[in-house]
Image (cartoon, rainbow, N blue to C red):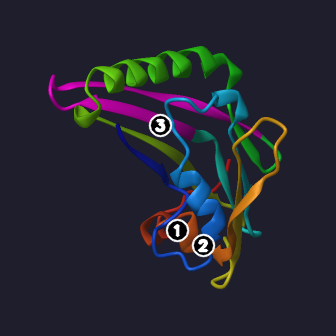
Amino acid sequence: MRVKVLFAILLSGCTSIVPMTAMRLSGLSPTTADPADFAVDLTLPAGIDVSPGAARLLFSTTRTDTDETASGAFALLRDGSVFRVDPADHDALRALQATARDWDAENPDATEGSMLINVAPCRVGAGPAADATVSVAIQMEQDGAFLPLVRNGPLSAVASEEQLREMPDCP
């Protein structure tokens, strides 16, 4: 199975990415990673936040030989700066992972998958300073350490220029 682990909070051109964490993420299998173990710690600068209820984990798997696709969007709950998959979504995500594993066992060359973290930014007050930075850390094991993925990266590490330009005010 070819798998893409993508983070909408990260853009590939970001020079603040911590290579060791990126390497570990490239070895993460979205089909076997327990949803209860995964968390993202997003440290945002003053003037920007994540819109309430607008953080999702998107999981998709496709079989090119049968033209089948299975996908789901799973809520990420926020606790301070940390986002975790909603426990109410664990079973549905695990079922989707099982489908991906089954398809991969049947035809690994025709099975692809992706996992994407998507958050929607919103503006607080006048918004972030032009030189504001952000940090992102990933936890891959329950009670494990948060591994730094982006250290003091530009805002473009978490949002596109268009998102920043059209960012709504936070509620």
Q: Residue at x 64, y 75 (%)?
A: 153
Q: Measured from the top left, where is residue 40 in percent x and y?
A: 69, 48
First in sequence: mark 3 or mark 2?
3
Identify the mark at residue 164; answer none if there is no mark: 1
Q: Measured from the top left, where is residue 85 in percent x and y?
A: 66, 31
Whether pointer 2 and pointer 1 mark residues with C-beta atoms closer than 8 Å, the reply is yes
Q: Is 38 rendered above or below residue 167? A: above
Whether pointer 3 and pointer 2 mark residues with C-beta atoms closer than 8 Å, the reply is no
Q: Which residue is mark 3?
A: 58
- Horizontal side of 116 relative to 20 (left or right) equals left
Identify the mark at residue 66; answer none if there is no mark: none
Q: Residue at x 28, y 31 (%)?
A: 62
- Is any atom of residue 126 visible in this view? no
Q: Residue at x 16, y 26 (%)?
A: 67
Q: Examine the structure image and report whether residue 156 is included in the region drawn in magenta.
A: no
Q: Quadrant of residue 108?
A: top left
First in sequence: mark 2 or mark 1?
2
- Is any atom of residue 109 visible in this view? yes
